[in-house]
Image (tube, helix red, strand yellow):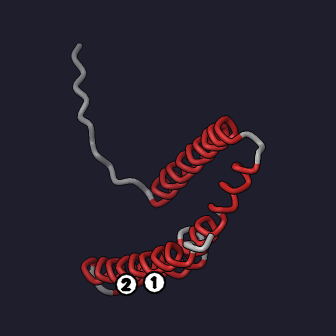
Amino acid sequence: MSTNFVEVDTPRTEKEKVSRAAGTVGFYTLLSRILGLVRDVVVAYFFGSKMAADAFFVAFRIPNLLRRFFAEGSLTIAFIPVFTETLTQKSKQDAFELARAVLTLLSLLLAVVTILGVLLSRGL
């Protein structure tokens, strides 16, 4: 007796799409935490609990603050709804043009902040 199976590519439901996306975000969040632990172990190995470790953590305070504001904070909360609205009410090309404009602006802002940081840190 021979049975032939034909695979049918059924479209995913909205719930499956959301579950898959949540799983992906959860996985990469876990990976980020593990890599953060590895980073802390490496820093502890090389710097120990001396003054060099304190200087290292102070040096990363401002970049981490900027990352929290722009990458994880208010910019993300403000950008995603606007991008989604542009994507649904206009065209995909308009949405990606908006994303390019925001990315260009943020890149210029990052360059200016970096140059200012280098120039103003010379006295330290």
Q: Nearer the viewer, residue 10 or 33?
A: 33
Q: Taking 67 as reference, is 53 left or right?
A: right
Examine the image and state in which quarter residue 45 appears. top right
Q: Is residue 84 visible?
A: no
Name the outermost residue toward the top. 1
Residue at figure coordinates x 48%, y 73% from the top left: 114
- Residue 13 appears in the rendering: yes
Amino acid beneath label 1: Val
Q: Quadrant of residue 55?
A: bottom right
Between the C-alphas of marks 1 and 2, the distance is 6 Å
Residue at numbered disc 2: 86
- The extreme front residue here reads 123
Q: Position of residue 95 (x, y in %)?
A: 33, 80
Q: Residue at x 50, y 49 (%)?
A: 24
Name the quarter where the C terminus is drawn.
bottom right
- Dot 1 corresponds to which residue? 82
- As drawn, 91 above or below 51: below
Q: Dot 2, crowdedness within 10 Å: few (<14), some or many (≥20)?
A: some
Q: Nearer the viewer, residue 43 or 36?
A: 43
Amino acid type at mark 2: Thr
Q: In the rendered image of this protein, does residue 65 appear above or below residue 94?
A: above
Report the quarter where the N terminus lies: top left
Depth check: give the residue in front, 22 or 31: 31
Disc 1 element: helix
Do labels 1 and 2 touch, CB within 8 Å? yes
Give me the residue at 53% from left, 53% from top.
Answer: 25
43 relative position to 24: left or right: right
